Image (cartoon, rainbow, N blue to C red):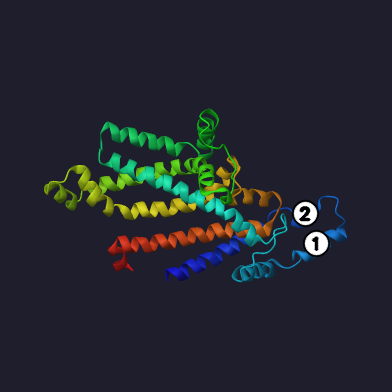
């Protein structure tokens, strides 16, 4: 049932993406040829690109091409879109994964720390820091990180990407500051969600029973409250990965990374519709896939959800 819903959602998304991008002002053929192109040359190129066909026919041809693994040819680069997207995804996907690791590595311990000290000064300071993290946008954090770690301390590169062929360490170092810029605001979100879940779960009987058997408050929360607080935390983590992948659009331009985010900007500027539609559909499919994985994980973590169907 969930697979059918995911497939239907993906189909509806393809209609919306195709319709939205193809009604935008501007002729891709005119953008490619320039303002001084002859009308017959422009008409020939529009015929070659299939722009003379009805929208429904063009959508169906595009959708059929996706199922065959053919995403078309980039109008800007003149190469298969699939190759172009794959070359950029090897930057954006590791960046989003690294940012998610930052969010989980900082957010969950911070939330557990604050929740175990509810009402104390440490709780207020941690949640205050989380509030600041929520208020500051990723690109501003990125600029501050570059000023501190790249320009002042000279520990990390300010931007660019050497490529995985140059070695894993240089590539990871190049992605570290962008991952921090992306991950720190999400760590703040995760800290607040974890803190709330821990505080609510700490009031339940099994936590008090754990303490009655000699566990300290921190041990009881870590062993009994945290596992039972995981469903809302896992839900937020799933949403965050989708957000982080989409959030690379801004951060990749700040750090001059050749990922999907920069490809989207370049495709919009060049009216490169095949590339733009393919990247957006890839992001939509990733969101749907992550949500499906989260649903299955929640069924595993909370047996009550299986009983509800």
Label 1 crowd bin: few (<14), some (14–19), many (20+), radius 10 Å: some
Q: Which element is circle 1 on? A: helix
Is residue 215 positioned above or below 275 on the image? above
Q: Which element is circle 2 on? A: helix
Label 2 crowd bin: few (<14), some (14–19), many (20+), radius 10 Å: some
Q: Is residue 86 left or right of residue 182?
A: right
**Label disc, if present, on residue 272 of the rendered structure:** none
Can residue 285 be seen at all in this image of the molecule?
yes
Pointers 2 and 1 in contact (CB under 8 A)? Answer: yes
Answer with the quarter of the image where residue 119 lies. Answer: top left
- The number of discs equals 2
x and y percentages locating residue 154 in the rendered image: 53, 31
Report the residue at 48% width, 36% height from top: 136
Report the residue at 83% width, 63% height from top: 44
Can residue 22 be seen at all in this image of the molecule?
no
Report the residue at 52% width, 53% height from top: 93
Q: Is residue 262 left or right of residue 35?
A: left
x and y percentages locating residue 309 in the rendered image: 33, 69
- Residue at the far top: name it: 152
Q: Nearer the viewer, residue 73 or 238?
A: 73
Q: Nearer the viewer, residue 160 or 42?
A: 160
Gap in angstroms between the C-alphas marked 2 and 1 = 9 Å
Q: Nearer the viewer, residue 266 or 295?
A: 266
Report the residue at 53% width, 65% height from top: 10
x and y percentages locating residue 17 in the rendered image: 60, 59
**Label disc, if present, on residue 45 of the rendered structure:** 1
Is residue 6 positioned above or below 85 on the image? below
Q: Is residue 91 left or right of residue 267?
A: left
Sequence-earlier tag: 2 or 1: 2
Give the residue at mark 2: 32
x and y percentages locating residue 183 in the rendered image: 45, 44
- Pick the quarter of the image with the N terminus: bottom left
């Amino acid at each position: 049932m969930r697979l059918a819903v995911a497939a239907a959602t993906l189909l509806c998304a393809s209609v919306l993406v195709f319709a939205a991008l193809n009604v935008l002002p501007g002729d891709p053929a005119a953008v490619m040829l320039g303002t001084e192109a002859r009308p017959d040359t422009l008409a020939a190129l529009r015929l070659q690109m299939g722009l003379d066909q009805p929208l429904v026919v063009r959508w169906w041809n595009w959708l059929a091409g996706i199922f065959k693994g053919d995403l078309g040819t980039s109008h800007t680069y003149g190469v298969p879109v699939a190759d172009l997207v794959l070359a950029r995804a090897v930057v954006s996907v590791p960046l989003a994964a690294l940012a998610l690791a930052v969010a989980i590595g900082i957010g969950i311990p911070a939330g557990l720390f604050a929740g175990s000290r509810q009402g104390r000064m440490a709780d207020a300071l941690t949640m205050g820091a989380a509030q600041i993290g929520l208020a500051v946008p990723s690109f501003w954090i990125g600029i501050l990180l570059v000023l501190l770690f790249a320009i002042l301390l000279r520990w990390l590169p300010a931007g660019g990407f050497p490529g995985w062929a140059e070695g894993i360490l240089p590539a990871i170092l190049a992605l570290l500051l962008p991952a921090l810029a992306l991950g720190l605001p999400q760590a703040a979100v995760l800290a607040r969600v974890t803190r709330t879940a821990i505080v609510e779960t700490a009031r339940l009987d099994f936590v008090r029973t754990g303490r009655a058997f000699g566990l300290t408050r921190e041990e009881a929360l870590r062993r009994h409250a945290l596992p039972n607080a995981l469903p809302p935390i896992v839900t937020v983590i799933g949403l965050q990965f989708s957000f982080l992948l989409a959030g690379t659009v801004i951060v990749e331009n700040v750090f001059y990374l050749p990922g999907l985010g920069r490809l989207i900007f370049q495709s919009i500027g060049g009216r490169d519709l095949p590339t733009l539609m393919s990247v957006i559909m890839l992001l939509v499919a990733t969101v749907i896939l992550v949500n499906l994985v989260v649903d299955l994980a929640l069924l595993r973590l909370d047996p009550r959800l299986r009983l509800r169907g």
